[in-house]
Image: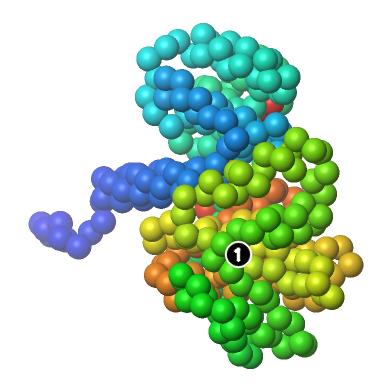
Amino acid sequence: MMSKSKDKITEGDVIMENDLLYNRKKHDIKYIEELSLNAWPSHMIELYDGWLIRFSHNYTYRTNSVEQVGASTIPVEEKIAYCEEIYRKFQTPTNFKINPLLDPDFDQLLAEKGYAIRHTTEVMTADMSNLNLYPLLSEEFEFENRLGLPSFVHYPEDLTVLLSPVITDEWIQGLFHLNGTCEPTLRRIVPSMFKAIPKETIVVSIEIEGRMVASGLGIRDRDYVGLYAIYVAPSCRRRHYARAICSTILREAGQRGAKKAYLQVVKGNSSAKNLYTSLGFEDFYTYWFRSK
């Protein structure tokens, strides 16, 4: 009788490997969710039995939603009612963020209560060693700063990206112009939200005749850098501005210790998705919001 080969892969081995991969992915998702919370503070936050109730006058879904970050002890129906009352006082919709770490039954419960899916978002990640960055021509160090960033990075076609380690009022006003933020309350509170970011920032922009026409923000936290606030004025699209913005952030973050990168793109934004894929990003997980 032939003996069983020691190298033979059994069904149990496959199950064990799949479990390890699943647990590793859960760990990585939790890690990125934590990084994104650090990167994007809300105007107001309440911690309620393992849930974060975030409020920022509807500036973004992420900063105006409930996120689950810890174990719960209060019955879920009671907690949902409490959150609804909080947002009712704020006179804004109640939003719950749904990510793959949550029990699917919670998403189903919200659906049964009339909560609709909103703002489905795809999280993409990349290894810094596998990026396909826009080739730079030169760098200029005109001003000293705490991160040692260049002041200007030059690319082909007379394209220059400006860098700073500090989020300035001028940069925020330029961002408002690019993303169409006009409401007076938001123009008052959002600057303090940006300035409350506790992590290292790489602030970039492109200007034409003194006017900001493209923006980007890199937020470095431990071994990751997150890409945020990537905007290009409609009249300046298809000129490689977004590629230059992203490449500048990624290159500088890599030189300062980042090993991986992540970003979040709204599902259906095919032009942005194509850019990020060409840079070397891959899909990792999807989250969405349930809104009532």
The number of callouts visible is: 1
Q: Position of residue 77 (x, y in %)?
A: 53, 10
Rendered-image quadrant of the N terminus:
bottom left
Q: Position of residue 83 (x, y in %)?
A: 58, 17
Q: Nearer the viewer, residue 196 or 58?
A: 196
**Residue 277's image quarter?**
bottom right
Q: Which residue is mark 1?
A: 203
Residue displayed at 39% across by 70% down: 257
Rendered-image quadrant of the C terminus:
top right
Residue displayed at 51% across by 77% down: 144
**Residue 237's image quarter?**
bottom right
Q: Is residue 254 above or below residue 141?
A: above
Residue displayed at 56% across by 62% down: 166
Q: Is residue 149 above or below residue 157?
A: above
Asked whether the viewer can see residue 22, the reply is no
**Residue 170's image quarter?**
bottom right
Tell which residue pokes out farthest to the bottom in this image: 137
Tell which residue pokes out farthest to the right in this image: 235
Q: Is residue 152 above or below residue 191?
A: below
Q: Is residue 286 above or below residue 130?
A: above
Asked whether the viewer can see residue 136, the reply is yes
Q: In the figure, is residue 280 to the left or right of 222? A: right
Could you tell me the amino acid type at mark 1?
Val
Q: Nearer the viewer, residue 158 or 8?
A: 158
Q: In the figure, is residue 224 to the left or right of 109? A: left
Residue displayed at 48% across by 46% down: 38
Q: In the figure, is residue 117 to the left or right of 24? A: right
Q: Nearer the viewer, residue 90 or 248?
A: 90
Q: Position of residue 165 (x, y in %)?
A: 54, 66
Q: Position of residue 210 (x, y in %)?
A: 81, 72
Query: Tag 1's secondary structure?
Result: strand
